[in-house]
Image (cartoon, rainbow, N blue to C red):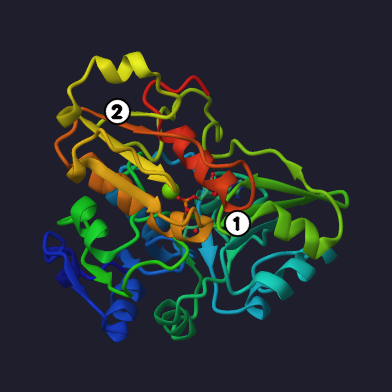
Amino acid sequence: MVDKNIEAKLMETIVGNDIENAVKILKAGHPVAIPTETVYGLAANALSSDAVLNIFKAKNRPHFNPLIIHLPDWDSVRKYVTEIPNEAEVLAQKFSPGPLTFLLEKKNIIPDLVTAGSSKVAVRIPAHPLTRQLLHLLDFPIAAPSANPFGYVSPTTAQHVLEGLNGEIPYILDGGPCQVGLESTIVDFDNQQVIIRRKGGIAVEAIEEAIGKKVLIQTGVEEHPVAPGQLKSHYATTTPLYVNWSEDMVAQFSPQKIAVITFGKNIEDVTAEHRFQLSANADFEEAAKNLFATMRKADVCGATIILTRFLPEEGLGMAINDRLRRAVHDSKD
Ligand code: TXA
Ligand code: MG
């Protein structure tokens, strides 16, 4: 049942840390933005198609893109999936709660809308204390994509969520800045094979170490979910962002029109206010945590183009490069 009082207030978005209020709104079938250690999510009751539809509406997200369900602990996962492969158990033991999402065969109780028709559901146990408290108070899982308008950079603060969804959702649960800063790594299981479907907050190497063997990397769920070509850029800034830029490109723009995002080494010949550092010490974890907030800052600093470079292709650098690649203007991927 949709609570008309909440619906009437939909245009006012409140930011706070009142968990009871978040519970009330979620129980009424409305979406609430929630903090997680990766990025902020836009949550709704995963067992109700009507509630889930409200997420798609608020985000302006195509319905063919499936959602991750979030649960308070690994034990509760068993209620919603038909089987858990051994390797999933091993990985859950090591990385849950945390930035790892598991694709597992779903039970019928999970609506097809959540999985976009797939027989597998994506499941994650988030580590943020506020959201864990919230999940313990609910008797349903919450489906939650990143809490940004479809296609834009993911939010890592309550303020980012407000900037994108003000007036679209009733409540933002403010849990401070996200500590990981990149979405979860998504793992799939097929015939003894562990497959990475999205690079994210847990490095590929860490997963291989935990299971004692190599994984397959088959990403692309976000670029080509079900309907190829329908999703253009993702994680995109409004200001065009270039990764493999050339010196003559720089020459076309005056220094005031260029913003640079760097890792480790800074670039001196760009206006100081347009230089953004992901991590002065070239630390992957710090860079991951800063990535989306930095992209947002560069986007509104007044520059005409944003220039950056790929990080070394290892550890969290792989996931960061993946996000940069997809934010690229005119991406050919
Ligand atoms: O860290 C995260 O994973 C964040 C926080 C909020 O938990 N969530 C997140 O959700 O990044 P979203 O919707 O922005 O990205 C989820 C990705 C989608 O690109 C989708 O294609 C994939 O997960 N996915 C979800 N369910 C799936 C399924 N059943 N089969 C294959 N891919 C799935
Ligand atoms: Mg997203």
Q: Left or right of 102: which side holds 37?
A: left
Q: Left or right of 251: which side holds 113?
A: right
Q: Nearer the viewer, residue 205 or 41?
A: 205
Q: In percent of the image, x 72 and y 54: which residue is there? A: 205
Question: Counting other residues with Cα less than 10 Å from the Cα at mark 2, is it few (<14), some (14-19), or many (20 or more)?
Answer: some
Amino acid, disc 1: Ala
Please tell me how many numbered marks the rendered image carries. Answer: 2
Residue 198 lies, in percent from the top left, at 60, 46
Residue 289 location, quadrant? bottom left
Q: Secondary structure at mark 2?
A: loop
Instruction: Find disc 1 in the rendering and name its residue.
Output: 122
Q: Nearer the viewer, residue 268 or 163?
A: 268
Query: Which callout, 2 or 1, points at the residue further toward the start of the chain?
Result: 1
Residue 153 lies, in percent from the top left, at 34, 45
Instruction: Find disc 2 in the rendering and name its residue.
Output: 240
Mark 1 CB near ligand 1 (8 Å cut)? yes
User: Mark 2 to mark 1: distance in Å?
Assistant: 32 Å
Q: In percent of the image, x 32 and y 69: which residue is there? A: 1
Amino acid, disc 2: Pro
Residue 79 location, quadrant? bottom right
Question: Counting other residues with Cα less than 10 Å from the Cα at mark 1, is it few (<14), some (14-19), or many (20 or more)?
Answer: many
> In the rendered image of this protein, does residue 134 appear above or below residue 322?
below
Q: Secondary structure at mark 1?
A: strand
Q: In percent of the image, x 59 and y 44: which residue is there? A: 318
Residue 216 lies, in percent from the top left, at 77, 43
